[in-house]
Amino acid sequence: MNKYRNVGELQVASELYEFINSEALPGSQVDQGQFWEGFENIIKELTPKNKELLVKREELQTKINRWHRENKVFHFDSYKTFLEEIGYLLPEPEEFSISTEGADDEIALKAGPQLVVPVDNARYAINAANARWGSLYDALYGTDVISDEGGAQNQSGYNPVRGEKVIAFARNFLDETIPLQVGTHKEAVSYTIDQGSLYVTLRNGDITRLKNEEKFVGYQGDSKQPSAVLLKNNDNYFEIQIDRAHPIGKTDAAGVKDILLESALTSIMDCEDSVAAVDAQDKVLVYRNWLGLNKGSLSATFTKGNKTLNRTLNPDRSYVLPSGSEFTLPGRALMLVRNVGHLMTNNAILDGNGNEVQEGIIDAVVTSLCAKHSLIGNTTFKNSEKGSIYIVKPKMHGPEEVAFANELFNRTEDLLGLARNTLKIGVMDEERRTSLNLKACIKEVQERVVFINTGFLDRTGDEMHTSMEAGAMIRKNEMKSTLWLQSYEKSNVNNGLSTGFQGRAQIGKGMWAMPDLMKSMLEQKIGHLMAGGNTAWVPSPTAATLHALHYHQVNVKDVQNNLLGSISDLRDDILQIPVSDDTNWSPEEVQAELDNNAQGILGYVVRWVEQGIGCSKVPDITNIALMEDRATLRISSQHVANWLHHGICTKEKVVKTMERMAKVVDEQNAHDPAYRPMADNLEQSVAFQAACDLIFKGYDQPSGYTEPILHSRRLEAKAKYSVRS
């Protein structure tokens, strides 16, 4: 149980109170007394507005459910008119362009990967920040991008056959990205700089230069024998690293030991879907790590093999310009922080009536306070060169909720003594009412918006919940080919481009969820650039480095310029509900769908509830590891709830499936000493009961969200097992 300190009419958990007073406030230029008084006023004045917005969500859902029940024969025009009448589908605003100022180049001008990571794990958070630069050789050697054929297995110890394949891939990258006037990089035996130009000596003695000499932008070391040659293509940097004494470099004719790519330009330090933060303990861990990232002081000690390692933030990288003067490039990704949405409350703070305070309000104030230290110089490494704090705001429904976030940010800036619009917002386009009214949502934050993106899983979960009464949904793996989803993805880009995001803000694309299938990612994820996204989510630093290759292959600015001439209103297509015209699935097809959903739900929930792991590689039913967070859970639980509601399956069948899949998940986790098996005692397994709740209570969950059940059951597990973190 939390112990509380009385602060005005608030009750603040002692752990949070001490963290803010002892760690977050000192040096922030914010008076302690004024902070708590202002914080209390924000809570008092904004909580009623927050709750009104949640009531409106439920009122609209009730009306939509009723309409579907009363209109079994679906007529699109009548449906659309109904949505307009109830204020669900709003008129498009007049043309406008966002006026965001002070966005860093990583957001406004450059295009590249975006890494999302749970901030409650210090090691992962540091790795994500340091993922600004990544070894191409390592990313290739350690993944399936390089085949095992011809004796190139990824074995213990270095395999020179595999190494040769890596080097050949990297040389092809150089030839495609920075081709030579004569010959190829495969023939290079030296790289030297003379009078500001890069010269490449080939095996036959010829000396050549780059076809586009402007791509050479700097170097490290001695100009005659540089240790690194810095190149720039499509506004992204990479290094040819040279060291003839290195185990790899000494086998290379030009002494090249590696290619270092600028990889994750931005990273989202996540307080939301990828963490399991349910009380003051958990929230303080989240906030403390975020504070440490902003002060540059966060470190993580861990054991790898028989070595103890300490991970800290990387410094900036220094170079010499071709002209001879020195300059630096950022050594770390520009960090954004994802707060929670408007729905949940947290017992870290109780209001004057003893009620839990809205967690989104707490997050806005405390994460901004922590980030202020980087702005005012209380840091080893500055995050934003332009003086901005970046907050990604998820799970908002329509422009009223975005306007509320804007008001919350205004109040937070005033409390912390920050200039207006210092707090930048990323609006996640992952709820149906936001997708349909995205332009109006953007208008509400047009002076501070820096980011919109799509999220297939959450968006599909909301699609199914909103239209629960419309009929039985198609099978889950068919969703990606539907008209509504393709139109949603296009519409997100269209709205960003039509409101002036180019040169000011990011248009994002979703996650690649299979971190072990990098060959497939290289083949497919380039589609995110071709669709006009100037950033896309990746699950690991390695994936960031490999995805960075796409941004050298495609100039996203050119793609966006071409798309500007074909923008159209796709809202009618987005409104196409993915119900099945033919529900005569065979018993085997129904069972396969249930097996897939049940195994996925249990595999994720058991780690969330029992171990407090909000994001991890979870094996699917075929044992392919998927990087999963709560969004995965939302789509699976809502799909089964929908099929139950429409009689595609019975409760008895689902229960038997869950019991059988519990054994499968237990076997998949048998190697984990911290794992508590479910199948041994299903009635006493908090995780199993939580998974069942998500399905059997799925119809009644607000917007189909999983958080209320997960939080309740996690708190139960912490009490039951005396879990401290």
Image: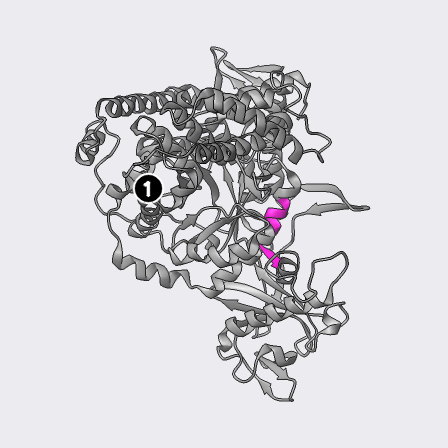
Between 699 and 246, the residue placed more toward the observer is 699
In the rendered image, residue 26, in percent from the top left (x then y), is placed at 61, 32
Placement of 227 over or under 436, stated as above or below: below
Placement of 603 over or under 328, stated as above or below: above
Q: Quick one: which residue is furthest to the bottom in this view?
A: 205
Between 339 and 275, the residue placed more toward the observer is 275
Q: In this view, does 137 lie to the left or right of 645?
A: right
Between 162 and 262, the residue placed more toward the observer is 162
**Residue span colored magenta:** 126-135
In the rendered image, residue 51, in percent from the top left (x then y), is placed at 38, 20
Q: How many marks?
A: 1
The residue that appears at 40% across and 20% down in the rendered structure is 700
Q: Is residue 342 visible?
A: no
In the rendered image, residue 289, in percent from the top left (x then y), is placed at 62, 36
The residue labelled by disc 1 is: 442
Placement of 657 over or under 7, stated as above or below: below
Answer whether residue 262 is magenta in the image. no
Q: How crowded is mark 1: few (under 14 residues within 10 Å), some or many (20 or more)?
A: many
Q: Is residue 135 left or right of residue 467?
A: right
In the rendered image, residue 449, in percent from the top left (x then y), is placed at 38, 44
The residue that appears at 82% across and 46% down in the rendered structure is 306
Q: Quick one: which residue is furthest to the right in this view?
A: 306
- For mark 1, give the secondary structure: helix
Between 693 and 325, the residue placed more toward the observer is 693
Answer whether residue 129 is magenta in the image. yes
Residue type, mark 1 in image: Ile
Q: In this view, does 151 lie to the left or right of 407?
A: right
Quarter of the rendering containing residue 46: top left
The image quadrant where one finds the N terminus is: top right
